[in-house]
């Protein structure tokens, strides 16, 4: 079977025409775009499908969504609602209007002490749970993509997860919805007269829902099919169980919205009942002789109180053995036909957990486990075990050949059919040549996930995928299962909905779609599709572009942590735009290539904060920030590289020149300085000279004078950023002075080397000047090697980004020189204070409250808890905003591109300014500048706040 050719890409003229029509429906017309780079960047999601939209629009209200629906209908183009783009089945893309309902939809309201929560669709599950954590509650659904999947996606796909089963899914925990129908009618199911309003506003829909309800209830066969399929996790087709579970049309419709994949309406707000967090847990990996042993063990384990039971087949175990965190026992096992259950028992108190484990011991002891049945309560060991399970995706996806796609599918079968289904899938993998496929899943629910690597580059490969899919459908349906348990129907399984449900219920679904969306406006082709080849259309090409980026699976996990996500592009978009450039180049489409590459310079390369938080979220470990630095380096010519190296050789003079320039600029009226810098930037120095602003700091104090101490406990390397930019006003001086004074008060002697001509190297690394970076690395590391007594003493720095830069400095050296400095230890000043000084300092005069901004470098250094500890030492209440993220000031990015920092800090600034605090603190001077600019509040280094609190009164 050959792929069916998809629809042609829209012409630029048609795209502009559609966007212009939609602009008239928005309060801010700039939120609609027909630009090719914006359309392609937004088009990619985690599925293997790709559709090029004609316009992308950011909607900001339910009224705007309704107006956009009317506008799209007038233009004769379909409309697709887009959240996090983590869906795997092709339900998040379309060829018409793509509407962003994430960016401006991130409000949350906790209700009833956390027992309920009102959410807009743009928050991620993790962000919603952060609001609930202080109440020891969370949302019921716990999808593996919780860091990136949005509430809107959770609703649209009826998400569940590892622990929620069928009882705590989005469908079961939803209390009310406010949604927009394709007609523009807004329905709030929480209103007392909601059903009456629906009857008045949508009489045909109201009556039609009653007819469908009675039609299903009066047909024993239909009722039996629905009850059987929805006794399992099931996201195949529409949630027809709503017609049995509810009687009023408004409640039926609200519950039908869940799992409807954006084909019936737009959910603007949802209220959910939450579930309790069980903080005390014990976890174990039970390795059993075979799949039958594992599945046979499930009923007894679940009856004994196991809240989670994750299955790993033999292939998954072999992959887990390669994980660095695998235990010696697991690594030493010769895996044949083995299987494993990762089980977890959890309760709300240590006493209850102990009682549950005691009761379960008999069940555990009777298992034929080949490596024992020990359970651990140690958080680190438990995290290691869960990493084995969650790392399967990373291991398989990261190791796939370049240019291929990692497919993650899921099915569910009745628990007694689990073993047969697993055996059948393994047989299909062998038959169709998927040698790297693995099976894992939520065994307690009969929910299996399987991963395989697939190329879509040739007709033969697509034929193979089609044959496998057909055989898999036969297998699962023969076992009485459902073809989609969690991931939604999308386009991947749309051709098989009729087969799973039968003609009668399929006709009910089609009538439901007609009643809600008579013009077929919303997401056509998704969930219901009579084309038997739709799952083979529009398959995504994955060209190779960069060895460091080719592993990207376009999952979007990186996007919530990216500070430029709401301003320019995200890491996923930076990668897919490179792929689009490669495709345009290969096709000889010079106009398309030129448009994409021209835009890429600013939207991807220059605006990137290069903070590398993306690597902390990426399941395959891609550092897109590092890739952007490499691209910056590639465009610098030999003269620029020589100039940067010269600056490294004469850094003392360069710093002095900047300090003199800042002082001189402050002596001139601001309008004059702003005009002068604007002219210089306009002449091509936009990446070197900032646009002057009223809040530009004055020059800082010189770096500390050298000092020595025979009994020194550390070396202090003062960051040069403190001498460039003076701190906010305060009696403590800058962060270097604060650190030195705290060490004096605690009686901790230090070595302070001569550092005026040294630097952590970050300015050269981030701007893409490898020669200058190496030059600075060679001199700085040599000096610190001597000062630290060849690595005996730790080296402490007072700016978190500079500590991080120092820790990376050896990588700039030639490979043969790196080993020499391997023993150097770099410690951030906050961590050093937390670990060594706090108990020895005088009792601080406490503040009532402190707003704290951790930096991205603090995350990389693993110092978040140390930062909190220092802040708690001085303040009764320490607040890190729920909307915290990187400020994107990124050294000089915030000076060169202030719009990036403004976008990155908007949400957290609004949250911080909801109330006043006694102090505002961070741990890096430029981040303090960024947060001060964003909030209008005086952010200082947390050590400055601490030293003022412990300094003896005169």
Image (cartoon, rainbow, N blue to C red):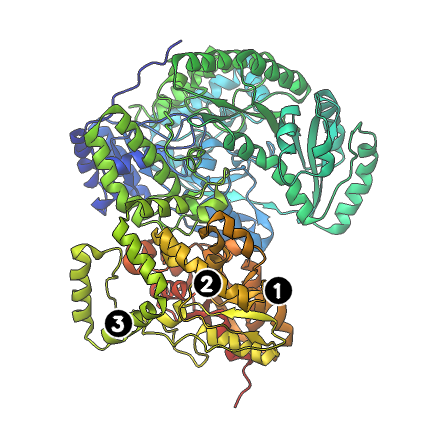
Q: Residue 32 at what x, y percent from top left?
A: 24, 40
Residue 556 is drawn in which quadrant? top left
Mark 1 and mark 2: span between their CA atoms? 17 Å
Quickly name the residue at label 2. 780
Q: Which tag is nearer the camera, tag 3 or tag 1?
A: 1
Give how far across and how far down residue 521 sits, in percent.
30, 27
Q: Residues within 10 Å of mark 3 (few under 14, many from 20)?
A: some
Mark with earlier residue (3, 2):
3
Q: Secondary structure at mark 3?
A: helix
- The answer to whether any part of residue 717 appears in the image is yes
Taking the view exactly as shown, the residue that stands out farthest to the bottom is: 954
Q: Please identify, in this view, whether the residue under mark 3 or under mark 2 is nearer the observer.
A: 2
Asked whether the residues under the numbered discs 1 and 2 touch, taking CB atoms below 8 Å apart as contact, a structural biologist would say no
Q: Residue at x 71, y 34 (%)?
A: 330
Residue receiving disc 3? 661
Considering only order in the chain, which callout, 2 or 1, is on the residue closer to the N terminus?
2
User: Disc 3 and disc 2: Cα gap in Å?
Assistant: 25 Å
Residue 246 horizontal side relative to residue 897, left or right: right
Q: Does residue 30 appear left or right of residue 921 in this picture? A: left
| Badge 3 or badge 1: first in the primary sequence | 3
Residue 189, relative to residue 204: is it above or below? Answer: below
Q: Is residue 756 above or below residue 603?
A: below
Q: Which residue is mark 1?
A: 792
């Amino acid at each position: 079977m050959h792929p069916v050719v998809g629809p042609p890409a829209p012409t630029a003229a048609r795209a502009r025409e559609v966007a212009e029509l939609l602009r008239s429906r928005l309060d801010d017309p700039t939120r609609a775009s027909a630009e090719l780079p914006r359309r392609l960047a937004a088009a990619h999601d985690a599925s293997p499908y790709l559709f090029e939209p004609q316009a992308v629009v950011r909607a900001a209200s339910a009224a705007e969504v309704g107006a956009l629906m009317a506008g799209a209908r007038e233009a004769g183009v379909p409309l697709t609602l887009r959240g996090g783009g983590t869906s795997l089945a092709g339900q998040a893309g379309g060829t018409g209007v793509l509407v962003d309902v994430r960016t401006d939809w991130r409000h949350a309201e906790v209700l009833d002490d956390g027992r309920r929560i009102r959410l807009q669709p743009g928050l991620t599950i993790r962000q919603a749970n952060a609001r609930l954590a202080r109440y020891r509650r969370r949302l019921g659904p716990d999808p593996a993509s919780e860091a990136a999947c949005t509430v809107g996606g959770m609703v649209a796909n009826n998400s569940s997860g590892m622990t929620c089963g069928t009882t705590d899914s989005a469908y079961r925990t939803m209390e009310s919805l406010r949604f927009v129908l394709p007609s523009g009618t807004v329905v709030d199911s929480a209103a007392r007269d909601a059903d009456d309003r629906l009857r008045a506003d949508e009489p045909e829909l109201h009556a039609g829902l009653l007819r469908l309800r009675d039609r299903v209830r009066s047909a024993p066969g239909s009722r039996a099919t629905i009850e059987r399929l929805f006794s399992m996790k099931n996201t195949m087709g529409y949630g027809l169980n709503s017609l049995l579970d509810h009687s009023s049309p408004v409640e039926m419709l609200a519950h039908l919205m869940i799992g409807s994949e954006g084909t019936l309406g737009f959910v603007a707000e949802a209220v959910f009942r939450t579930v309790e967090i069980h903080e005390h847990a014990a976890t174990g990996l039970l390795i059993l002789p075979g799949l039958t042993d594992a599945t046979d063990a499930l009923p007894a384990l679940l009856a004994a109180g196991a809240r989670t039971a994750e299955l790993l087949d033999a292939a998954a175990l072999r992959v887990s053995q390669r994980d660095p965190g695998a235990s010696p026992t697991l690594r030493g096992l010769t895996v044949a036909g083995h299987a494993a259950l990762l089980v977890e028992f959890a309760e709300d108190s240590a006493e209850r957990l102990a009682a549950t484990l005691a009761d379960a011991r008999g069940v555990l002891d009777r298992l034929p486990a080949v490596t024992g049945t020990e359970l651990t309560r140690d958080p680190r060991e438990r995290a290691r075990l869960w990493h084995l399970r969650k790392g399967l995706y990373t291991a398989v996806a990261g190791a796939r050949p370049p240019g291929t796609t990692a497919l993650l599918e899921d099915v569910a079968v009745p628990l007694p059919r689990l073993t047969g289904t697993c055996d059948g899938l393994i047989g299909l993998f062998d038959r169709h040549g998927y040698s790297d496929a693995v099976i894992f899943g939520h065994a307690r629910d009969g929910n299996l996930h399987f991963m395989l690597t697939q190329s879509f580059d040739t007709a033969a490969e697509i034929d193979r995928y089609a044959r496998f899919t057909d055989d898999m459908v036969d297998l699962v349906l023969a076992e009485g299962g459902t073809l989609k348990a969690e991931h939604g129907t999308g386009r991947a399984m749309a051709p098989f909905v009729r087969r799973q449900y039968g003609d009668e219920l399929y006709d009910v679904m089609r009538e439901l779609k007609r009643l809600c969306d008579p013009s077929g406006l919303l997401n056509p082709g998704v969930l219901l599709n009579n084309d038997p080849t739709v799952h083979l259309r529009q398959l995504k090409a994955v060209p190779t572009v960069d060895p460091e980026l080719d592993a990207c699976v376009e999952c979007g996990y990186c996007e919530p942590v990216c500070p430029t996500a709401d301003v320019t592009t995200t890491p996923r978009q930076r990668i897919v735009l490179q792929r689009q450039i490669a495709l345009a180049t290969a096709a000889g489409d010079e106009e398309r290539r030129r448009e994409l590459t021209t835009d890429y310079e600013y939207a991807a390369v220059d605006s990137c904060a290069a903070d590398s938080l993306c690597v902390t979220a990426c399941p395959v470990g891609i550092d897109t920030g590092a890739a952007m630095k490499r691209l910056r380096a590639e465009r610098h010519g030999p003269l620029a590289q020589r100039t940067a190296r010269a600056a490294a050789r004469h850094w003392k003079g360069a710093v002095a020149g900047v300090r003199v320039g800042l002082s001189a600029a402050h002596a001139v009226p601001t309008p004059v300085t702003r005009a002068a810098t604007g002219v210089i930037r306009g002449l091509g120095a936009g990446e070197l000279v900032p646009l002057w602003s009223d809040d530009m700091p004055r020059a800082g104090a010189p770096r500390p004078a050298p000092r020595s101490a025979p009994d020194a406990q550390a070396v202090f390397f003062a960051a040069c950023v403190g001498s460039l930019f003076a701190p906010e006003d305060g009696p403590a001086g800058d962060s270097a002075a604060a650190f030195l004074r705290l060490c004096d008060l605690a009686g901790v002697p230090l070595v302070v080397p001569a550092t005026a001509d040294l630097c952590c190297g970050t300015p050269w690394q981030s701007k893409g000047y490898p020669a200058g970076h190496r030059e600075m690395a060679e001199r700085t590391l040599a000096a610190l090697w001597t000062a630290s007594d060849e690595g005996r003493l730790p080296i402490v720095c007072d700016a978190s980004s500079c500590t991080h830069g120092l820790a990376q400095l050896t990588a700039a050296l030639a490979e043969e020189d790196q080993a020499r400095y391997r023993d150097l230890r770099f410690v951030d000043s906050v961590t050093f204070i937390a670990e060594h000084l706090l108990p020895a300092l005088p009792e601080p005069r406490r503040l009532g409250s402190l707003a704290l901004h951790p930096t991205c470098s603090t995350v990389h250094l693993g110092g978040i808890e140390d930062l909190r500890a220092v802040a708690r030492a001085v303040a009764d209440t320490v607040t890190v905003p729920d909307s915290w993220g990187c400020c994107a000031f990124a050294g000089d990015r915030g000076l060169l591109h202030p719009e990036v920092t403004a976008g990155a800090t908007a949400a957290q600034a609004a949250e911080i300014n909801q109330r006043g605090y006694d102090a505002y603190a961070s741990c890096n001077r430029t981040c303090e500048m960024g947060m001060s600019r964003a909030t209008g509040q005086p952010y200082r280094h947390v050590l400055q706040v601490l030293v003022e609190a412990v300094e003896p009164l005169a």
